[in-house]
Image: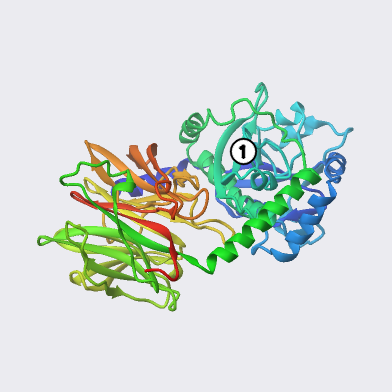
Amino acid sequence: MKIIATNILLNLYFMKKLRIAIINYPLYIFDWQKAIINNLIDSNFSEIVLNLDFHEEMKELQNSTNAVPVFFKSYLKIDSKFFKPVPNALAKTDKSDKSDKINNITTLSITKTIDIKSLEEYELDIILNLTELTLNNEIVDKAKYGVWFLNFCDLNYINKRPYGIWEMLEKRPEMTGVLRYIKTGMTYPKTIDQTFSCTDGLSYKRNLNDILWQSHFLVGNNIELLSKNEELFNKKLLTKSGIYPENEITVPFSPPSNTKMLKFAIALYAKKLFQVIKSKIYFNQWALIFLNNSNSNENPYDLKHYKKILPPKDRFWADPFLIKHNNKTYLFIEELIYKNKLGHLAVMEIDNEGNYSKPETILVKDYHLSYPFIFKEDDEFYMIPETSGNNDIQLYKATDFPLKWELQKVMMNNVVAVDTTLYKEHDTYWMFTNLKKHKGGSKHVELNLFYSKSLLADHWEPHSMNPIVTSVKTARPAGKLFIKNNKLYRPSQDCSSHYGYGLNISEITKLNPNNYEEKLVEAIKPNWDKSISCTHSFNSAEELYISDIKINRNRFLP
């Protein structure tokens, strides 16, 4: 505990407030921009000392993006009428609203006649450009750490605006948000960080809304890291150096043609019609799959060899965990009976052949429960279920294993945390959990890591590099960590196409308070059976393996 306390004090001692200038639109501010600015104003790691107003250049930029094909314009109107995301990242606040914090910041209008050298007196660390305006080299030179800016597309495969529509048209499974910077002497910008969100195949407005909210975290996260520990920040830059190494600053504006939009609309509504008809005959259900690998020596990551365990049609079973005790194997699951609409936790016995007993309910709340992460510590059984519906992380202890459990500790309060997974190494507990930090953010994208010397600690120290993973493809936990051939592995979910689409197995190569690294070693897709569209957990107990699938079942056949 002394080491943890020392780390906290050192971070506070060496933290410096970075001096930042903001560039945004002259007459209004979007809510996603306001969230970034307010976070920086309220923080202990930055101060916004200047608001740069490029009024003339902004007019030219706006005029260059006004003309769009009529079919795309019509689609935008229809989309805006039917889809109203909350909170709306593109909601506007008029700059004349004096109640906004940004109006207390000194504004400097940048014109052709102003002397750019006057910026030097502000001793800027960062110029944060929240627009698509490309700045000249003279401006770039006036901040110690250069100009930082966001793009909201994959700069290799999409690289065009309007952001959000091309991923839909080209059926890309995820949206990309990337934070880059440029300094004097650099030919191309360099990547600081990136994140992802699932592509919404139906609504452009929802699609753009998701990536704007998800990306706005990148700014504060990385400015805070730079302020606290520049050495760690520079190490992080090295890990991102291969991401978009030779991409230009400007992302060209290229709205889809009328022909492209017409083809998209026809295909989209034909697909929806087919789904409606199909839903009258089939329904999607989460079910379990099981493998006894004691004799067969199958590859446990090849799920086609697993045996299906189908629940009754009035419910689903998901998030399975196995644990052995007194020569019996217990299978803990999330069970959701459709008419009840909320998941609860249940347990069943399962033998080596996959035969199982009737599930018995072990925990019910007036909010959703799932992911019964179960483990043994000092001959006692503990469980951390997902309780994001209650905005906390709870630890339970078995009083009569496996059926009776009592709350032992609320490990964290006021957090939307999903799929919390614990791992103990030597005398340190590591807590992996995905956090949703904003109503507009996603539960699938940011993996955070905390550590403590005590399971019952009142405070868990956040990892210096949090969030340690910012990817919809690999962030969200999918089961307990495990050791194989003296290597540590972490199962995770691939939510890029949709929630729970696939599985990953990643090897953790560095795990300490200041560093975390993992590398993907296995990607498991639900491609071995046409009736299966998802698989999103992976657990084992000795030679027994368990996973789950979302399967398309006929409503009328057994």
Quadrant the C terminus occupies: bottom left
Q: Is residue 245 above or below residue 5?
A: above
| Residue on which disc 1 sits | 154
Residue at the outermost left position: 326
Q: Is residue 553 above or below residue 546?
A: below
Q: Residue 330: x, y in percent?
A: 20, 63
Horizontal relation, residue 122 to residue 199: left or right: right
- State the count of labels: 1
Whether residue 35 is visible = no
> Tag 1, which secondary structure?
loop
Please tell me which residue lies in front, 543 or 310.
Answer: 310
Q: Residue 61: x, y in percent?
A: 83, 40
Q: Quadrant of residue 351?
A: bottom left
Q: Is residue 277 above or below residue 292?
A: below
Horizontal relation, residue 5 to residue 322: left or right: right
Horizontal relation, residue 144 to residue 1: left or right: right
Q: Residue 123: x, y in percent?
A: 67, 35
- Which residue is rendered at x = 35% and y = 47% of the image? 491
- Which residue is rendered at x = 40% and y = 54% of the image? 433
Please state which amino acid type lies under the numbered disc 1: Asp
- Which residue is rendered at x = 77% and y = 39% of the image? 254
Q: Residue 484: x, y in percent?
A: 23, 40
Whether residue 135 is visible = yes
